[in-house]
Image (cartoon, rainbow, N blue to C red):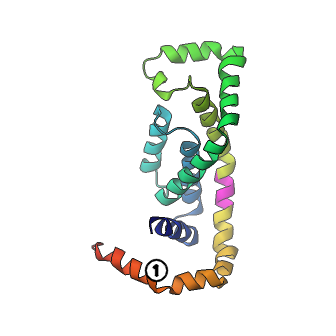
Amino acid sequence: MFWIKFVTNFLKILRAGQTPRQIAGAFALGAIVGLSPSLTLQGVVIWLVIFVLDVNLSAAFFAYGLFALIGFLFDPFLNNLGYFLLVDVTALHGIWTYLYNIPIAPLSRFYNTVVLGSFITGVILSVPIYFAMKRFVVAYRTHIHARVEKWKIYQILNRSSLIHWYQRVRSLGVRP
């Protein structure tokens, strides 16, 4: 039931609620954290940014889960990119040495090829992800949602007694 609630919350925020910029920003930040390993300095900093900014947490968590799967699938490519940046680009060797000697920088684990490759990829892809998601939210609200409501599966799930029972049980613990 957790996944049903998770997907329905995500669809609700696409339909209404926060602005498309807030949803797209959360999705882009969640993509960065999802692509790169979370237990690094930059992962913690990005999670703090997500919690401090006025962005949608459901979109951030959804993007985190989605891009963690994508990152897992593209690990060999991300490893090669990180290796290229760490070893093959000799102009960056001085920067890597300098960062390694700073007391807090090694907590970012930039010296790991997968971490560096995935973080750089996440940062680069966050800009097109932001604009694509912003455009998708606007399109969903204006055109797609009306079509989704006409689907038989949507109507069946919306009228399902199991779903209504679950929502009643879930709301028992909620206090106004």
Residue 55, position as x, y percentages in the image: 49, 55
> On the rendered structure, is 78 left or right of 7?
right
**Mark 1, residues whose alpha carbon is within 10 Å: few (<14), some, or many (≥20)?**
some
Q: Amino acid at mark 1?
A: Ile
Residue topped by disc 1: 163
Q: Splitting the image into 4 quarters, where does residue 94 fall?
A: top right
| Location of residue 79 in the rendering, given as x and y in whole percent from the top left corner | 65, 31
Q: Nearer the viewer, residue 113 or 133?
A: 113
What secondary structure characterizes most of the magenta part? Answer: helix
Q: Residue at x 47, y 48 (%)?
A: 50
Q: Quadrant of the C terminus?
A: bottom left
Magenta-colored stretch includes residue 76: no
Q: Position of residue 63 (x, y in %)?
A: 56, 53
Q: Which residues are magenta?
A: 130-135
Quarter of the view holding residue 82:
top right
Asked if residue 134 lies in the magenta stretch, the reply is: yes
Measured from the top left, where is residue 7 in percent x and y?
Answer: 53, 67
At horizontal 61% and vertical 27% (from top left) the residue drawn is 113
Quadrant in the picture for the N terminus: bottom left
Vertical side of 127 occupied by 139: above or below: below
**Residue positioned 43% across, 22% down in the render:** 104
